[in-house]
Image: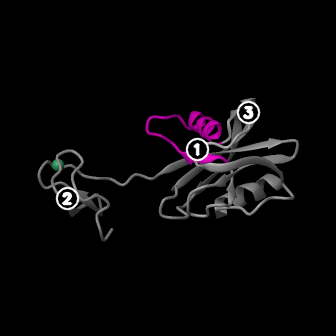
Amino acid sequence: MNKPSIRFCPLCGTPVVLQEVLNELRPVCPSCGYVHYDDPKVAVAVIVLQEGKVLLTRRIYPPEEGCWTVPAGFMNAFEEPVGAAERECLEETGLQVRVTGLLDVLGGREHPRGADVLLAYLAEVVGGELKAGDDASAAAFFPLDALPPLAFASTKKLLAKLKR
Ligand code: ZN
């Protein structure tokens, strides 16, 4: 880390300094001793297959706006991952889903605002009505052999795994 990820102590507001703590340079507060750990960001995704078609949403925001991806989003603190996945799907597509299994766990941040860990669940629709919401400009089912332009290597990887 060359530059601290935070400038001020979140507890007391004093400017932080970089110090080696547990073998890494981390932002430390010279006043109250607070050490800032940059935690990994965790995202959850759901893969909903219905009659050979997969549920996708079109992105409103950069990066890769206009391209399609599976319903996904960040987990909130203190949230439980399956619940987070079901919540994200409802928010983005209007569909209530029930997680039925784990498809894959992917690691590595693809872009600066991405996740370090992506938990990709399989899910089935149990209610709701298909309509785009939140950070999606459209939500629709696509045949696996006729997919629209996809956002992110992780989406392509998950859908490729689904086809097998
Ligand atoms: Zn402080």
Q: Earlier in the sequence, mark 1 or mark 3?
A: 3
Q: Position of residue 98 (x, y in %)?
A: 70, 32
Q: Which residue does the numbered mark 3 point to in the structure image?
A: 129
The C terminus - image quarter: bottom right
Whether label 3 lies within 8 Å of ligand 1 gets the answer: no
Instruction: Report the front residue among 101 and 136.
Output: 136
Residue 134 circle label:
1
- Write the residue at 32% across / 53% down: 37
Contact, mark 1 vs mark 2 (Cβ under 8 Å): no
**The disc labelled 1 sits on which kind of residue?**
Asp
Image height check: is 91 above or below 114? above
Mark 3 Cα-neighbour bin, 10 Å: few <14, some 14–19, many ≥20? few
Residue range highlighted in magenta: 71-92
Q: Which residue does the numbered mark 2 point to in the structure image?
A: 16
Q: Earlier in the sequence, mark 2 or mark 3?
A: 2
Q: Earlier in the sequence, mark 1 or mark 2?
A: 2
Q: Position of residue 105 (x, y in %)?
A: 62, 51
Mark 1 Cα-neighbour bin, 10 Å: few <14, some 14–19, many ≥20? some
Contact, mark 1 vs mark 3 (Cβ under 8 Å): no
Which label sits in the foreground, 1 or 2? 1
> Label 2, label 3: how many angstroms apart (C-alpha)?
48 Å
